[in-house]
Amino acid sequence: MIKEEEESKQKNTDCFVMMPFTTPAGYEKDHFDKVYEQIVKPAIIDAGFKPIKVDENHLSTSIISKIFDGLINCEMAICDLSSKNPNVLYELGIRQAYNKPVVLIKDEKTDFIFDVSGITTIEYQSMRLYEHVIHAKNSIKNAIIENSKSSNKMVDIIKANSAIITNSNEMTNEDKNTIMIKSLFSEIAELKRILLHNPQNYSQELKLLNDKAEKYYNKFKDDLTYIFEEIYNERSFNSAKYNMYLLKLESLRNRLLNSSNLNEDMLNDLEECIDSVNSILDERIKHVKET
């Protein structure tokens, strides 16, 4: 018994969890937190693995590193395709780019994704009635066990835009840049969904919506600073352009705070600003490769 416990400790039994962090339109509040606690986490534990889930409240150096470490180094992974969250799909692409095993799950509300439609995907019921939870847990547990025994791995299911297979597990600056930018675009899209979903409830939802948008604006500014100062470590590179976009972000934030209504034009301006920053980063990558 002691020998078995020692062998279990030595074996990598970590299972990385890829799920949406935010609650998309059409789902109850904290829906995916409940799916994780009631279905995913127990299934992973029952299969003999340790669940590893990164709670992304702010994209910092440590959070990005933890995400990539989990994607690349965890023995097993589980990916919830429900709501077709772009960040989750991107993480799945990275996992597959490194040829690592993964169990795919989704709820009944989500259509099969074309790129993975030929791969077995465990379906669970989003309503989470007791009998549905038990069935889903058992199905996911069995899939994890089966995957851990199999030597076959799914490769190129979803192509990660900038994930490159190398002999090293180190994440490249391009990888870091891409996941940060994709996350920013994802959050802008989330704000747009909120706007489109509650047009009749602006008076009731306005304060909550503005609070959430202000948090995102502050986050965008912090994340862009991180990209330039930490990832590229050259504050002088395109500093004039960079400062211009920071000022534009501040202007957008002031428009938000001084307006009586958040509108899609503001979000489109922000999206254009982030896209311009992305172009600067692409220019930086090209510059480095040419020198």
Image: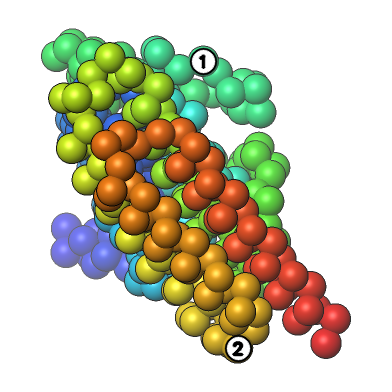
Kindly tell me whether residue 182 is visible in this rendering. yes
Q: Quadrant of the C terminus?
A: bottom right
> Viewed as shown, does residue 273 lie left or right of 18?
right
Please state which of residues 208 and 10 is positioned toward the viewer in this rendering: 208
Q: Amino acid at mark 1?
A: Asp
> Viewed as shown, does residue 78 lie left or right of 199?
right
Residue 34 in the image, given as x and y percentages of width and height? 19, 31
Dot 2 crowding, Cα within 10 Å, few <14, some 14–19, many 20+: few
Residue 245 in the image, given as x and y percentages of width and height? 54, 66
Please state which of residues 34 and 176 is positioned toward the viewer in this rendering: 176
Vertical placement of residue 5 versus 95, above or below: below
Vertical placement of residue 11 versus 61, above or below: above
Secondary element type, mark 1: loop
Please state which of residues 221 and 52 is positioned toward the viewer in this rendering: 221
> Viewed as shown, does residue 94 lie left or right of 279?
left
Whole-number angstrom distance, CA of label 2 to CA of label 1: 46 Å
Q: Residue furthest right?
A: 290
> Viewed as shown, does residue 133 lie left or right of 158?
left
Dot 1 crowding, Cα within 10 Å, few <14, some 14–19, many 20+: few
Q: Amino acid at mark 2?
A: Ser
Q: Residue at x 48, y 68 (%)?
A: 246
Vertical placement of residue 107 versus 206, above or below: above
Residue assigned mark 2? 236
Q: Residue at x 45, y 42 (%)?
A: 266
Q: Residue at x 53, y 41 (%)?
A: 268
Please state which of residues 98 and 236 is positioned toward the viewer in this rendering: 236
Residue assigned mark 1? 111
Residue 80, by quadrant, is top left
Residue 32 in the image, given as x and y percentages of width and height? 27, 32
Q: Quadrant of the N terminus?
A: bottom left
Foreground: disc 2 or disc 1: 2
Q: Are marks 2 and 1 in contact (CB under 8 Å)?
A: no
